[in-house]
Image (cartoon, coloured by chain):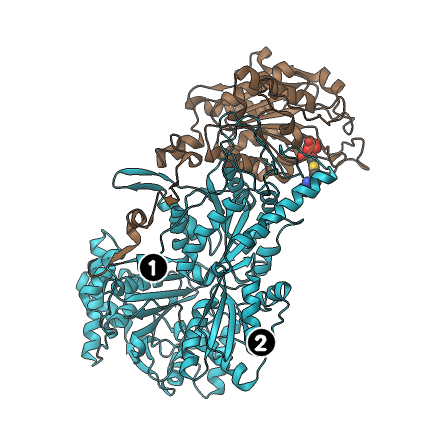
Chain colours: A brown, B cyan
């Protein structure tokens, strides 16, 4: 296949016509293009669900993993080769239900990965059951009874988990979305974007019309999410938490919180392994003509604390 | 005391958290410095402080022991509870070192003994006509030939406190040194030698070294006064100039580093976690100022993440692995199938412990063979191999990484708690030089297809991150590009070609590298795997002396099983002389072998107490089967 700088593949996009996922796909492709990233420097990692298919439609490395496990796969990829730009594209069920533990863990680590939550409030691919973002009492089309369980707030979860970039976007505003994705990808640290995504087939409550009337842009109201100095962290975080609670007549989108001062995991690893980014795990020579770079003689030095010399101490 | 065969075994027992491991380390190191070989093995509860733990320290002037053995020559007890757990292990000539201030302690007064154990020991003492006290237990042992050495630990500590100006409270922290020093004295360790052991253990903390040496001198002086004479081990014949002192966990960590592992993930679990801790402690591979790279060890949020991250890492070309035991492995299985369908070389180091569920979390067993072999839905190839001792663990670790890359599949390396927690003094020359083979590798490029099968089942592997190369992976069935397809004809090829890799491995890896036959006696054949090895080899020797001449078939690779060789060997012996030995409640290898060879075992020796199979009990069971016609034997040695 020729190099495709439009980041499109020949795979037929098999989402329902009118699905919000098309907007997210276009948002990612636009961002990659505008960032001028080479397809082999990017890895899009997904879980299972309608959203899980995203990597197959993007001309960049794609790793379509297991339900809920996109983040740990992405973590391994990024740790092994920190020069790659790693983007996780996952469903709300995937990232906030079965994989919620991983989502929290990534925040704690502040590893440089961008998380895109396809937030459609339903389990799309299994035919519309409630996802963890569907509020209690709401009955979408394919639910036999109203939902029993309360919704998780992805923004609050991200803020309390330690993500240093937290945003919300709307799938159908591609320009705005791709702009946020660009900033998230460029940010060094864990970034989460909760993307409101109408599901045309199963979600007849949070529809395109519902959002159209309510969504407004934070930046248009002068919202300043950026932590420029660690001393601002507490106030900015508290403000972001309050803002994250806003849902109803008005639904804010935009960058809610952006801490540019926090150390990423790579920085922390560097303090222990100074050569980490220069010679990351994926780029080390381990053998020369079949002989290990570290042989037993070298081991006896590296593991000198395990060596006992006979006749000495 | 029996210094027979140039070797002795000392048992050190005490409450967890009282420094028993330290004591065993000091003793082992001191002997290693004198050129003796040491094999030590520890049993412990799932508990941090207070419950009974013990260590067999087996010392030889001649060669590295291959296993711990039962019936210690010395039983050195820190506390009363240790006497109750171990007095039945004494035989003619066994020395028991105990604290005279505990003789009147009643077993009922010891809260840390589990009721089942207490009741069992109580009824033994009662039915044999002894008091249910330390005194009763000691009498029981003495009447069976044990020699008692009572020391007043309190008095010794008091003298120690006076001489060093410590409070009695602080002096008590050195309690573990008393039985250890007494053992060292009896085995002929000089204070200078013991001091070297302390110095190495407490590197740089000279005061602690000096205090311990002081106490050891007090103990030795006291023993001398009481008329106990040391009976030193013979001088070592031809000792190496250095030892690598390693547990099973440590040797795997070392072998992984040599094999080129550069990213390891893990979630803490017994008895696997220590391997990762060892790796992390040596993460910077810097030798004489030269930087040879690093091993990144990453603690994940759970085992699902551990394996997923290891697999993700492998996609970028790094040799990666994760390490766990049964409960963690169970969580990894879905991802293992992903590695299977995506042909990812990933190594899972699997230390078996007693299951099911939490089972016996700090004890051992071999019941996870099928879990390793048959884990995962749908069919995908994986190689499963198992190690029986430290040298095998080293070799197998390196083979695991080579095979994973050569055949592009997950490899499960089985070990167990017995090996993980055995510490040996290994002469480095026992470790053969490693060869690294990375299999078919491609630099990718435009038009690269990760799953192009036009050249056969193994596609040259390009790494994510290669210049001008774009790769897709999916857990769905996929086409040559790695995109989803449910096309039936594509499925025929892809699904079949993946399985063919295992058949290829079966053709290409010589069967002789997948099993080993020890001995050639025709009276019986023991068949086993993993930690059975040490006990089996030693049992062969004992039985030889008794006029029963046998052999041991040690299976090292379970998938692909060396079936032709196994089949041939088994048919030479036949059902009456082939005995399957396993630390398991039902014989798993005894069911796997028939699957591939049709040979049905009819003789079994099994053990499922969570304690290792020991050589003498194994020899006894073999003798029952071969001489007395018994069909199956259950072993139970060990507190
Ligand atoms: C371990 C596991 N359990 C269940 C499933 C079935 N499953 C497939 S997709 C899905 C839910 C997808 O919902 P979501 O993550 O919100 O993604 P969407 O389809 O809405 O994009 C489930 C439960 C699975 N693939 N794996
Ligand atoms: Mg969803």
Q: Nearer the viewer, residue B344 or A14?
A: B344
Residue at mark 1 to residue at mark 2: CA–CA distance: 35 Å
Q: Position of residue B571 (x, y in %)?
A: 58, 73
Q: Position of residue A174 (x, y in %)?
A: 64, 16
Residue B491 falls in image quadrant: top right
Q: Position of residue B356 (x, y in %)?
A: 59, 61
Residue B12 falls in image quadrant: bottom left
In the depicted structure, whether residue B604 falls above or below residue A40: below
Report the disc number at residue B430: 1
Numbered disc 1: what chain? Answer: B
Q: Is residue A241 left or right of residue B236?
A: right
Numbered disc 2: what chain? Answer: B
Q: Is residue B247 left or right of residue A97?
A: left
Report the disc number at residue B395: none
Q: Position of residue A27 (x, y in %)?
A: 62, 19
Does the closest atom of ligand 1 sit within 8 Å of the Cβ of label 2?
A: no
Q: Locate the N terminus of chain A and report the quarter of the image it occupies.
A: top right
Q: Is residue A134 visible?
A: no
Does the closest atom of ligand 1 sit within 8 Å of the Cβ of label 1?
A: no
Q: Nearer the viewer, mark 1 or mark 2?
A: 2
Q: Is residue B87 visible?
A: yes
Q: Callout 1: 10 Å neighbours few (<14), some, many (20+)?
A: few
Q: Residue at x 46, y 56 (%)?
A: B271
Give the secondary structure at mark 2.
loop
Q: Callout 2: 10 Å neighbours few (<14), some, many (20+)?
A: some
Q: Is residue A215 left or right of residue B392?
A: right
Q: Nearer the viewer, residue B218 or A309?
A: A309
Q: Locate the C terminus of chain A and report the quarter of the image it occupies.
A: bottom left
Residue linked to disc 2: B574
Find ligand 1 in the image and state its quadrant: top right
């Amino acid at each position: 296949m020729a190099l495709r700088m439009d980041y499109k593949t020949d795979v037929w996009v098999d989402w329902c016509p009118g699905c919000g996922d098309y907007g997210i796909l276009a948002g990612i492709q636009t961002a990659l293009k505008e960032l001028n990233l080479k397809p082999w420097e990017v890895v899009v990692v997904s879980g299972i669900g309608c959203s899980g298919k995203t990597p197959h439609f993007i001309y960049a490395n794609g790793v379509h993993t297991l339900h809920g496990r996109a983040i740990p796969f992405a973590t391994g990829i990024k740790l092994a080769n920190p020069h790659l730009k790693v983007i996780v594209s996952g469903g709300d069920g995937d990232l906030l239900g079965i994989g919620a533990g991983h989502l929290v863990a990534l925040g704690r680590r502040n590893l440089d990965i961008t998380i895109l939550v396809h937030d459609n409030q339903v389990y799309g691919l299994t035919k519309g059951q409630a996802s963890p973002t569907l509020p209690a009492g709401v009955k979408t089309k394919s639910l036999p009874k109203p939902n029993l369980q309360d919704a998780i707030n992805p923004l609050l979860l991200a803020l309390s988990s330690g993500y240093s970039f937290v945003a919300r976007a709307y799938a159908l505003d591609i320009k705005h979305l791709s702009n946020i994705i660009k900033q998230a990808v460029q940010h060094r640290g864990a970034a989460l974007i909760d993307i409101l995504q109408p599901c045309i087939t199963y979600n007849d409550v949070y529809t395109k019309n519902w959002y159209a009337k309510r969504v407004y842009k934070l930046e248009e109201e002068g919202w300043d999410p950026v932590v420029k100095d660690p001393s601002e962290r507490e106030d900015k975080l508290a403000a972001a938490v309050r803002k994250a609670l806003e849902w109803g007549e008005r639904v804010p989108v935009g960058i809610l919180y952006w801490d540019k001062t926090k150390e990423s995991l790579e920085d922390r690893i560097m303090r222990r392994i100074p050569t980490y980014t220069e010679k990351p795990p994926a780029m080390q020579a381990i053998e020369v003509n079949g002989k290990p770079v570290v042989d037993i003689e070298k081991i006896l030095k590296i593991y000198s604390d395990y060596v006992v010399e006979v006749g000495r101490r | 005391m029996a210094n027979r065969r140039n070797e002795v075994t000392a048992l050190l027992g005490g409450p967890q958290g009282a420094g028993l491991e330290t004591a065993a380390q000091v003793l082992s190191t001191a002997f290693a410095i004198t050129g003796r070989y040491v094999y030590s093995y520890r049993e412990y509860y799932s508990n941090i402080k207070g419950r009974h733990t013990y260590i067999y320290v087996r010392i030889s002037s001649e060669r590295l022991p291959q296993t711990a053995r039962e019936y210690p020559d010395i039983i050195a007890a820190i506390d009363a509870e240790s006497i109750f757990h171990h007095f039945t292990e004494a035989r003619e000539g066994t020395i028991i070192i105990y604290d005279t201030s505990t003789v009147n302690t009643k077993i009922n007064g010891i809260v840390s003994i589990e009721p089942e154990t207490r009741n069992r020991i109580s009824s033994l003492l009662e039915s044999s006509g002894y008091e249910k006290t330390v005194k009763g237990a000691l009498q029981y042992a003495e009447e069976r030939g044990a020699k008692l050495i009572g020391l007043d630990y309190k008095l010794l500590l008091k003298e120690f406190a006076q001489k060093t100006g410590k409070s009695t409270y602080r002096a008590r922290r050195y309690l573990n040194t008393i039985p250890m020093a007494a053992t060292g004295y009896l085995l002929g360790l000089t204070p200078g030698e013991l001091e070297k052991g302390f110095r190495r253990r407490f590197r740089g903390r000279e005061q602690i070294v000096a205090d311990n040496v002081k106490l050891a001198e007090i103990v030795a002086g006291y023993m001398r006064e009481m008329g106990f004479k040391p009976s030193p081990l013979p001088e070592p014949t031809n000792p190496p100039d250095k030892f690598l002192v390693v547990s099973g966990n440590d040797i795997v960590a070392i072998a992984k580093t040599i094999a080129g592992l550069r990213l390891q993930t893990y979630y803490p679990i017994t008895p696997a976690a220590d391997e990762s801790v060892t790796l992390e402690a040596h993460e910077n591979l810097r030798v004489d100022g030269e930087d040879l790279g690093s091993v990144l060890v990453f603690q994940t949020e759970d085992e699902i993440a551990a394996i997923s991250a290891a697999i993700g890492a492998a996609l970028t070309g790094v040799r990666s692995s994760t390490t766990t035991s049964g409960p963690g492995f169970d969580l990894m299985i879905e991802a293992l199938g992903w590695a299977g369908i995506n042909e990812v070389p990933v190594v899972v180091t699997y230390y078996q412990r007693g299951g099911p569920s939490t089972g016996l979390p700090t004890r051992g067993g071999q019941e996870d063979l099928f879990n390793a072999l048959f884990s995962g839905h749908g069919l995908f190839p994986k190689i499963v191999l198992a190690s029986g001792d430290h040298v095998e663990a080293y070799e197998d670790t390196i083979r695991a990484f080579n095979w994973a890359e050569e055949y592009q599949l997950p490899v499960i390396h089985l070990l167990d708690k017995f090996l993980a927690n055995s510490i040996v003094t290994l002469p480095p020359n026992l470790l053969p030089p490693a060869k690294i083979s990375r299999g078919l590798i491609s630099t990718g490029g435009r038009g690269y297809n990760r799953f192009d099968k036009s050249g056969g089942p193994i596609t040259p592997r390009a790494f994510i991150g290669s210049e001008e190369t774009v790769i897709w992976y999916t857990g769905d069935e996929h086409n040559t590009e790695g995109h989803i397809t449910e096309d039936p004809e594509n499925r025929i090829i892809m699904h079949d070609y993946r399985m063919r890799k295992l058949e290829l491995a079966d053709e290409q890896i010589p069967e002789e590298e997948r099993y080993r036959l020890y001995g050639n006696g025709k009276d019986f054949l023991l068949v086993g795997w993993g930690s059975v090895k040490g006990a089996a080899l030693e049992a062969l020797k004992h039985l030889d002396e008794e006029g029963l001449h046998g052999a041991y078939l040690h299976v090292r690779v379970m998938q692909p099983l060396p079936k032709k060789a196994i089949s041939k060997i088994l048919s030479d012996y036949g059902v009456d002389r082939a005995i399957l030995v396993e630390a398991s409640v039902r014989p798993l290898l005894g069911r796997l072998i028939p699957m591939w060879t049709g040979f049905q075992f009819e003789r079994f020796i099994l053990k499922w107490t969570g304690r290792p199979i020991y050589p003498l009990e194994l020899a006894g069971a073999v003798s029952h089967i071969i001489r007395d016609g018994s069909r199956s034997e259950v072993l139970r040695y060990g507190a």
